[in-house]
Image: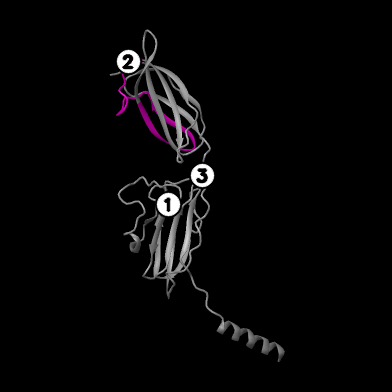
Amino acid sequence: MVRRLLIVALLTALAVAPAAHATNTRVSISNFAWSKPRVEIDLDEKVIWDWIGPDLAHSVTGTSANALAWDSDPGTDAPSHQLGDSFTLQFSQPGTYAFQCKLHASVRGEVIVSNVPGDPNSDPGPQAPLQLDVKKPTLGAVSLRSREIHGRDGTTTTAQISERGTLEAEYFRLRPKGGRRFNGYSTWDAFIGINRFALGAHGKHFKARPGRYLVVLRATDQSANVSKPVRKRLTIVEAF
């Protein structure tokens, strides 16, 4: 009898207990992952996506049929944000909404909206602390297949880079009587590990002409930190 009374009391308490409900929700991107890849909210509530760093080149771009109209970075395939940026959407229809970063397909998530009326004025909480990246990337083990270039295709070059970002080469043509003159530059997308690129190749910003060159290489990460420069010399013998 006592056990039966306890069960009845428990069921009664559950019946009168207030139902849990969702609220406006805040999520943040850091180190190539959302803090809550799966967000559950009720009707008319909001999701706020925050870019807190150190990586900022991510978008919130709808991929499911019901989400194709929204994009945090419209008109570009190269999303870019400032530290602390936010993007907010309010959901007035139930369903599951899928999204991903247009630059990094693995950075993805979904918003699940119930058919229960929600509270669009609920407090989503504060933005997570910003994570400012001030560490410089490293650029090393730069190796040229040949220091003499025949033609306009440059020489295959490898370099070890510690962070994603860009790699830039500045070309200075060495004068026969001393001194140097800036003669253009080349840039490449950089990733973590061994990068391969054609140093001294004729391009949009560097016109390969016969001569001796000093090349200054720098890596820049996604937080605009720049590595120490690496200097190499090469000679363009012919540029067909």
**Mark 1 highlights which residue?**
85
Q: Residue furthest right?
A: 2
**Mark 2 highlights which residue?**
210
Mark 2 belongs to which amino acid? Pro
Q: Earlier in the sequence, mark 1 or mark 3?
A: 1
Q: Which residue range is magenta in the image?
A: 185-211
Quadrant in the picture for the C terminus? top left
The mark lying in front, picked from 2 and 3, is: 3
- Image x and y of residue 65, in percent: 33, 62
Q: Earlier in the sequence, mark 2 or mark 3?
A: 3
Dividing the picture into quarters, in which one does residue 188 lie?
top left
**Mark 3 highlights which residue?**
132
Asked whether the viewer can see residue 37, the reply is: no
Q: Earlier in the sequence, mark 2 or mark 1?
A: 1
In the displayed structure image, the side of residue 8 where residue 189 appears, left or right = left
- Image x and y of residue 41, in percent: 45, 68
The residue tagged with tag 3: helix, strand or loop?
loop
Quadrant in the picture for the N terminus? bottom right
- Image x and y of residue 137, in percent: 51, 35
